[in-house]
Amino acid sequence: MIMELKVIGTGSKGNAYLLDDGQEALLIECGVGIMDIKKAIGFNLDMIVGCIMTHEHKDHSRSINELISAGIDVWATEKTHEACGTIVHHRSCILKHHRRVNIGSFKVMPFDVKHDAKDPCGFLISHTDTGNILFITDSFYCPYTFRDLNNIIIEANYCPVIAKRKLSDMEFLRNRIIKSHMSIDTCEDLLLANDLGKVNNIVLIHLSDSNSDEKAFKLRIEKSTGKKVTVANNGLVINLNKTPF
């Protein structure tokens, strides 16, 4: 089957991504309106086997209550559910770092990341069609490396040079970005720290509207990795299979 990555939303206004093979789908983040999620799945929420959520900030969790009310399991760390006020619901499923869970045909292993949230995480997602997918966002650093990756979805939020120039009069905002999001420099370092031999796609997500350069980021990562690089924008749909054909 063909597994599609559907970008419902990416960036500070709202994040949500679907892995959809036409029969079942995994929702990653729910930081957009529930109607946007319904439209992306053809108004068939029954196809969604679960939602995995990295942390409680609204641009990643906006529709959590609507999903739970619709009967969809939402997976997040215990502290994240507590921060969202959803810890007592039976559809609130608990993730623990480095413990793999099965969600439909997807296998998901969360791991800890560095962000200004209660207990944020990234994900290593495995599926027969996609192989191993690394998903990491809203983290200024990742101490781990990963083996046998086939696809990578990774934050490239800002360029330090652009941020310094544009936010010279807003030091508090610049410091918050630097301390909680991944720069293009760190993104590149993280990618090159891993074995990219089997990687088919690198998708750059959560670019800052004012502190990034989409074309420059794409060219830079393509040049340093030698891989196909796509910058995520709302509405993007690409194949995310284990093999390129």
Image: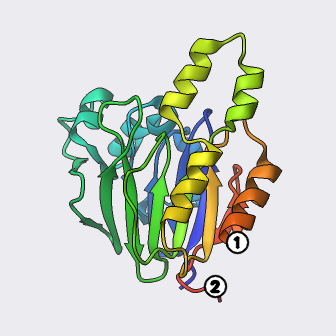
Q: Do we see residue 161 in this rendering? A: yes
Residue at position x 62%, y 50% in the image: 205
Residue 221 picture location, percent across and down: 69, 60
Q: Residue 228 carries which label?
A: 1
- The residue to which callout 2 is attached is 244
- Does dot 2 land on a helix, a strand or a loop? loop
Q: Is 85 placed left or right of 194 in the picture? A: left
| Residue 239 position by quadrant | bottom right
Q: Can residue 156 be seen in this view?
A: no
Q: Which of 43 and 154 is in front in this view?
A: 154
Would you say the residues marked 2 and 1 are in contact, meaning their CB atoms lie under 8 Å apart? yes
Determine the image quadrant of residue 40.
Answer: bottom right
Q: Looking at the rendering, in which quadrant would you find the C terminus?
A: bottom right
> Would residue 211 be found to the left or right of residue 103 on screen?
right
Residue 17 in the image, given as x and y percentages of width and height: 54, 54
Q: Where is residue 145 in the image (x, y as percent from the top left)?
A: 40, 63
- Whichever of callouts 2 and 1 sits on the residue coming sooner in the sequence is 1
Amino acid identity at mark 1: Lys
Please, is residue 115 above or below residue 49 in the view? Answer: above
Q: In this view, does 195 lie above or below 29?
A: below
